[in-house]
Amino acid sequence: MKARVYVSFKETVLDPQGKTVCSALKSMGYDSIADVRQGKFFEITLNPDADKAEVEKQIAEAAEEVLANPVIEDYRVEFIG
């Protein structure tokens, strides 16, 4: 089983890298792109013998305390397999 954690800035936080990428894409002719927000992606391989409820708790805790800064970032977790 794997967990995927997606981390991105909250909507109220400025994203200068996203703005720069958006500007570059528009200058290259990608006119349909209105905005770009950048983020982080973590793919975590889990112990196959682990208890699912405990895994969900630990991944949420890790995302909240280590992978994301909850003051400025949101995250979502997806489990695969």
Image: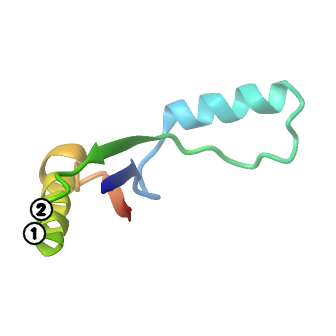
Q: Residue at x 85, y 24 (%)?
A: 28
Amino acid type at mark 1:
Glu
SS label for mark 1: helix
- Tell me the tag on residue 50: 2
SS label for mark 2: loop
Q: Quadrant of residue 25?
A: top right
Of tags 2 and 1, the one toward the viewer is 2
Amino acid type at mark 2:
Ala
Quadrant for the C terminus, please. Answer: bottom left
Q: Residue at x 14, y 75 (%)?
A: 53
- Tell me the tag on residue 4: none
- Horizontal side of 40 relative to 38 (left or right) equals left
Image location of residue 64, percent across then percent down? 18, 57
Crowd class of label 1 (few under 14; some 14 to 19; many from 20; radius 10 Å): few
Residue placed most toward the observer, 52 or 40: 52
Q: In which quarter of the image is residue 20?
A: top right
Image location of residue 42, percent across then percent down? 34, 42
- Horizontal side of 48 relative to 74 (left or right) equals left
Mark 2–mark 1 distance (CA, rounded to whole Å): 7 Å
Q: Residue at x 13, y 60 (%)?
A: 49
Q: Where 72 sits versus 79, above or below?
A: above
Residue placed most toward the observer, 72 or 4: 4
Q: Residue at x 21, y 54 (%)?
A: 63
- Horizontal side of 60 relative to 17 (left or right) equals left
Residue indicated by mark 1: 54
Image location of residue 16, percent across then percent down? 51, 33
**Dots 2, 1 in contact, CB < 8 A:** yes
- Horizontal side of 81 relative to 22 (left or right) equals left
Crowd class of label 2 (few under 14; some 14 to 19; many from 20; radius 10 Å): few
